[in-house]
Image: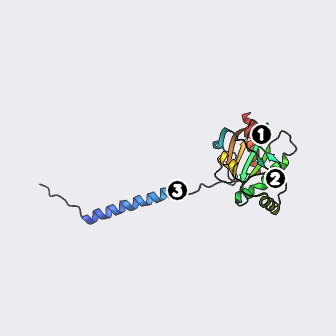
């Protein structure tokens, strides 16, 4: 008859602690990977995963002069880049010169693409002073003081830009800073779908 072997309680304790340590280490690695921001390349072409199709919510907002009202229907038949921004948002500020250059390069095209930026929650005096400070003079800016349009479009992060086709459908959404070259890529993709 064979004698029963008793496991030493000390060995069991060490094995349990070792397994527990491995479990904790794996859990920390998993949580760290999940929370780490994904590396963003300096330039991203218009990604297909951001293709969306919904009717652009209508609105009417004042421009910086406080007298002129603007609505998406004013751009019917044209591609519209609708950008949400604020002066305190660093990537928003970095993309504003590209938007002004884009608007200027298509200004003479009656049916060409258009741009409308929507400032969130700031006054005309604040926005005008800020634009003057950074040297922008011809940026089309509407004011969403109460941020109703922001809510209607589901904007959660700034900057956010929607690309609306001539029929009034939102076709693309770009989160983060928009580059001038990207705007051209979005236009090409819309043309390819036509």
| Local secondary structure at mark 1 | helix
Tell me the quarter of the picture where residue 152 sits.
top right
Q: Residue furthest top?
A: 194
- Badge 1 is on which residue? 73
Residue 3 x %, y %: 14, 58
Label 2, label 1: how far apart the Cα atoms are: 19 Å
Q: Residue, x 47% and y 59% (percent of image)?
A: 28
Are circles 2 and 1 on residues that touch, CB within 8 Å? Answer: no
Q: Earlier in the sequence, mark 1 or mark 3?
A: 3
Q: Earlier in the sequence, mark 2 or mark 1?
A: 2
The disc label shown at residue 193, or none: none
Q: Residue furthest left?
A: 1
Viewer-nearest of discs 2 and 1: 2
Q: Residue, x 32% and y 61% (percent of image)?
A: 15
Front residue of 82 and 40 = 82
Residue 177 x %, y %: 70, 53
Q: Earlier in the sequence, mark 3 or mark 2?
A: 3
Q: How is the image coloured?
A: rainbow
**Is residue 76 shown above or below 24?**
above
| Local secondary structure at mark 2 | loop
Residue 68 x %, y %: 83, 48
Label 1, label 3: how far apart the Cα atoms are: 44 Å
| Local secondary structure at mark 3 | helix
- Badge 2 is on which residue? 66
Label 3, label 2: how far apart the Cα atoms are: 48 Å
In the image: residue 150, left or right of residue 35: right
**Is residue 6 shown above or below 51?**
below
In the image: residue 12, left or right of residue 180: left
Residue 99 x %, y %: 78, 51
- Badge 3 is on which residue? 33
Tell me the quarter of the picture where residue 121 sits.
bottom right
């Amino acid at each position: 008859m064979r004698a029963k072997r008793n496991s030493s309680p000390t060995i069991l304790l060490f094995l349990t602690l070792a397994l527990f340590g491995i479990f904790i280490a794996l859990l920390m690695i998993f949580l760290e990977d999940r929370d780490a921001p994904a590396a963003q390349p300096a330039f991203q072409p218009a990604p297909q995963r951001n293709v969306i199709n919904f009717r652009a919510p209508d609105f009417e907002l004042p421009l910086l002069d406080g007298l002129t009202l603007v609505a998406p229907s004013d751009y019917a038949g044209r591609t519209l880049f609708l950008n949400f921004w604020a002066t305190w948002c660093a990537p928003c500020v970095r993309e504003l010169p590209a938007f002004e250059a884009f608007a200027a390069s298509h200004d003479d095209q009656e049916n060409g693409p258009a741009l409308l930026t929507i400032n969130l929650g700031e006054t005309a005096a604040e926005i005008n002073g800020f634009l003057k400070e950074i040297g922008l003079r011809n940026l089309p800016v509407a004011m969403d003081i109460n941020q109703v349009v922001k809510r209607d479009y589901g904007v959660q992060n700034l900057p956010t830009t929607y690309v609306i086709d001539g029929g009034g459908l939102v076709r693309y959404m770009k989160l983060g800073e928009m580059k001038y070259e990207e705007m051209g890529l979005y236009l090409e993709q819309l043309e390819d779908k036509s």
